[in-house]
Amino acid sequence: MTGRYLARRLLAAVGVLWAAFTVSFVVLYLLPGDPVATMASGGLDGEPLPPEQLAALRARYGLDQPVIVQYGQRLLAALTGDLGTSIQNGQDVRGAILDALPPTLQISAAGLAVAVLFGGTVALVATYTRVLWLRQLLMALPSLAVSPRCSGSG
C-alpha cells in the first residue's frame, strides 16, 4: 500500500511540474513583443541592431523555430538539467539559481526558526495558562490560518 501511495504521489508531482512548465511556456509565448528585439533594442552602443543580427540572435536562442518545436526542445533540455541562458543578461540560468540558493535557504531557515519558536511559545502559553480567555484566544489562533475548504466546513 505504501509503495502504491508513493508512486501515485511521485506521478502527481511529475504532472504538476509538467503542467507548471507548460503553463509558463504558454504564458511567456503569449506575452506581446519579441524578447530578442527587446533585449537588442539598444544594441551595445545604443544603436538598434540590424535585422541580420536580430535573426542570428533568434536562431541562437531557438526563437526562429515553430512554437511546438521550441516547446519540445525546452522541455527536453529542462529534463536534462539545461535551463538555458538568460536573454536579459546572458547568464546561465542554472548557475543563477545555484547562486541564489544559499541566501534563499538562509532566509527559509530563519523563517522556519521564527515560526517554530513563535508557534511553540503560543502552544506552551495556551496549554499552561490558567487565564481562561487567553487560553481560548490562543487555542483559536491555528484555525484562523486554515481555509474553510481545508477544515471541512466548505
Image (spheres, rainbow, N blue to C red):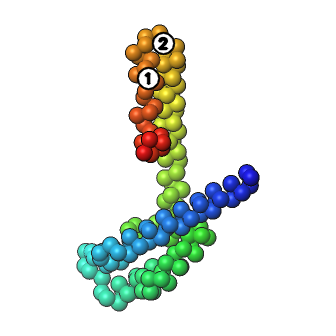
Quadrant occupied by the C terminus: top left
**Mark 2: few/some/many CA within 10 Å (<14, 14-19, 20+):** few
Please give the residue where the numbered disc 1 appears in the rendered image.
138
**SS label for mark 1:** helix
Q: Position of residue 99 (x, y in %)?
A: 51, 54
Q: Position of residue 92 (x, y in %)?
A: 50, 66
Residue 147 visible from this viewpoint: no
Q: Measured along the vertical axis of the image, is residue 19 above or below residue 106? A: below
**Mark 1: few/some/many CA within 10 Å (<14, 14-19, 20+):** some
Q: Measured along the vertical axis of the image, is residue 148 above or below residue 78? A: above
Q: Measured along the vertical axis of the image, is residue 104 above or below residue 88? A: above
Disc 1 and disc 2: Cα gap in Å?
10 Å
Identified at 51% across, 23% down, the residue is 123
Which of the 4 quarters of the picture holds residue 144? top left
Q: Measured along the vertical axis of the image, is residue 131 above or below residue 42? A: above
Identified at 50% across, 84% down, the residue is 69
Q: Nearer the viewer, residue 70 or 102?
A: 70
Which numbered disc covers residue 129?
2
Q: Amino acid at mark 1?
A: Leu
Q: Amino acid at mark 2?
A: Thr
Q: Does 50 sit left or right of 5 as displayed? A: left
Which of the 4 quarters of the picture holds residue 66? bottom left
Hey, which residue is sitting farthest front in the picture?
153
Identified at 53% across, 62% down, the residue is 16
**SS label for mark 2:** loop
Q: Are marks 1 and 2 in contact (CB under 8 Å)?
A: yes
Q: Nearer the viewer, residue 72 or 107?
A: 72
